[in-house]
C-alpha cells in the first residue's frame, strides 16, 4: 500500500534542470509541496511554476550553491521560515566535469565534482536533518549513479564521487536507525539531461554523441522512480535502486543502432 504525498514537504536540490526539475513536476502532480534549490534562479522560477501547474499547492524556490556551507545554511534558514518539518529530502545536485584520464585531468574538475556530489550532499543533509528527524517516515533520497558501482576510463573522480555518495547513504542509514528516518539511493545509468553538456563544458555535439543510437532514460523516468520510493509506507525503505535504459545492459555494454 502506498502512502499519500499530498501536502508533504519535499526539498529538491539541483531543481533547475534534468532529474531535479522533473522531480519537482512529478512530486507536484502528487499534491506535494516542493522546495527547490539551485544556482540558476531564473530556471527555478520556471520549474516552480511548472510544479504548481502540475498540482503542487506550494512550490517555492531559493538560490542554493551546495558547494558553499554559507549558501546551504542561508538556504536552510529560509526553508525554516516556511516549514519546521520536511518529509523528503532529495540530494540530487551534482554532475560530472570532464572525461579526462587521471594523467591529464585538472584539480578544478576534481574539486568541483567532490564539492557537489560528495560535500554538497553532506552539507545539505547535515543542515536538513533537524527538520527530518521531527517527521516520522521521512526520507533522505540521494541520487547516485551506476558510475558509483562500476568504474570507467576518464571517470576516476566522478566514479569516486558517486561511490562516495553510495557509502554516505549506507553510513547515514546506520546512523539514523531507530529515528524513523529512511535513507535510500537511486542510481541511474544513461539519461538524457544537461548532464553531458555540463560534463563537456557546453560542447553540444560531443554531448549528443553520448546518446547517439540509444533510447536513454528521460528525466521523467527517474523522477517517477523517486516518487515511487518516497511513496512507500513508513515501515518500508528501498535501500538502493539501480535504473537503466533497456539499451544499457551494463556501463560498457550499450546497444547502439544507426538511426
Ligand atoms: P543536469 O545537469 O540536468 O542537472 C544538474 C542539476 O544540479 C542542475 O539543476 C544544477 O543546477 C544542479 N547543480 C550543479 N551544481 C550545483 C551546485 N553547486 N549547487 C546547487 N545545484 C547544483 O543533470 P542531471 O539531472 O542528469 O543530474 C542530476 C543528478 O543525477 C546529478 O547528481 C548527476 O550526477 C546524477 N546522474 C545523472 C545521470 C545522467 O546520465 N544524466 C545518471 C546518473 C546520475 P544549477 O547549475 O542551476 O546550480
Ligand atoms: C551518469 C551516468 O555512465 O555517464 O552518472 O557516468 S555515466
Image (tube, grey):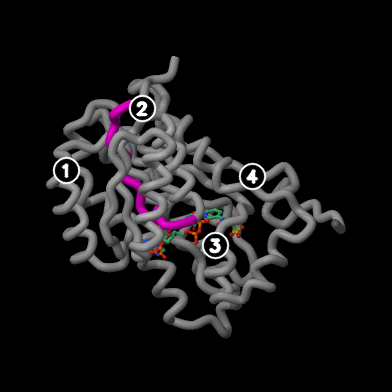
Q: Is residue 113 above or below residue 101?
A: above
As helix, strand or loop, the secondary structure at mark 4 comes to: loop
Q: Residue at x 58, y 74 (%)?
A: 200
Q: Measure how far apart labels 3 and 1 are at the Cα level.
A: 31 Å
- Assess mark 3: CB under 8 A from ligand 1? yes
Q: Indicate the position of residue 68 as horizontal and vertical percent values.
A: 26, 68
Element type at mark 1: loop
Q: Which residue is mark 4?
A: 244
Give whichever of discs 2 and 4 has the lower sequence position. Answer: 2
What residue is shown with label 3? 195
Q: Nearer the viewer, residue 116 or 107?
A: 116
What's the CA distance linking mark 1 and mark 2?
A: 18 Å
Q: Is mark 1 within 8 Å of ligand 1?
A: no
Query: Start and end of the magenta stretch?
Result: 6-17
Quadrant location of residue 169? top left
Q: Which one is earlier in the sequence, the residue at label 3 or at label 1?
A: 1
Which residue is under mark 2? 5
Q: Gap between marks 1 and 4, in whole Å?
A: 36 Å
When the figure is inspected, residue 94 is found, relative to residue 48, above or below; the finding is below
Q: CA distance from mark 3 to mark 4?
A: 15 Å
Amino acid at each position: 500500500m502506498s502512502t499519500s504525498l499530498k501536502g508533504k514537504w519535499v526539498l529538491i536540490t539541483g531543481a533547475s534542470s534534468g532529474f531535479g526539475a522533473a522531480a519537482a513536476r512529478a512530486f507536484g502532480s502528487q499534491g506535494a509541496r516542493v522546495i527547490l534549490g539551485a544556482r540558476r534562479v531564473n530556471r527555478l522560477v520556471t520549474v516552480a511554476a511548472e510544479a504548481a501547474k502540475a498540482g503542487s499547492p506550494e512550490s517555492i524556490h531559493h538560490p542554493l550553491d551546495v558547494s558553499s556551507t554559507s549558501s546551504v545554511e542561508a538556504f536552510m534558514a529560509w526553508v525554516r521560515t516556511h516549514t519546521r518539518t520536511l518529509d523528503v529530502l532529495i540530494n540530487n545536485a551534482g554532475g560530472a566535469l570532464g572525461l579526462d584520464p587521471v594523467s591529464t585531468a585538472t584539480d578544478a574538475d576534481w574539486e568541483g565534482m567532490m564539492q557537489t556530489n560528495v560535500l554538497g550532499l553532506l552539507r545539505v543533509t547535515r543542515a536538513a536533518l533537524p527538520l527530518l528527524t521531527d517527521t516520522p517516515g521521512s526520507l533522505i533520497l540521494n541520487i547516485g549513479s551506476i558510475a558509483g558501482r562500476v568504474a570507467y576510463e576518464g571517470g576516476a573522480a566522478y566514479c569516486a564521487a558517486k561511490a562516495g555518495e553510495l557509502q554516505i547513504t549506507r553510513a547515514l542509514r546506520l546512523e539514523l536507525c531507530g529515528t524513523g528516518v529512511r535513507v535510500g539511493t537511486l542510481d541511474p545509468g544513461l539519461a538524457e539531461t544537461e548532464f553531458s553538456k555540463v560534463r563537456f563544458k557546453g560542447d553540444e555535439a560531443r554531448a549528443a554523441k553520448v546518446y547517439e543510437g540509444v533510447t536513454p532514460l528521460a528525466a521523467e523516468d527517474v523522477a517517477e522512480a523517486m516518487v515511487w520510493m518516497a511513496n512507500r509506507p513508513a515501515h518500508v525503505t528501498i535501500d538502493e535502486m539501480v535504473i537503466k535504459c533497456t539499451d544499457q545492459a551494463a556501463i560498457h555494454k550499450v546497444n547502439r543502432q544507426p538511426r
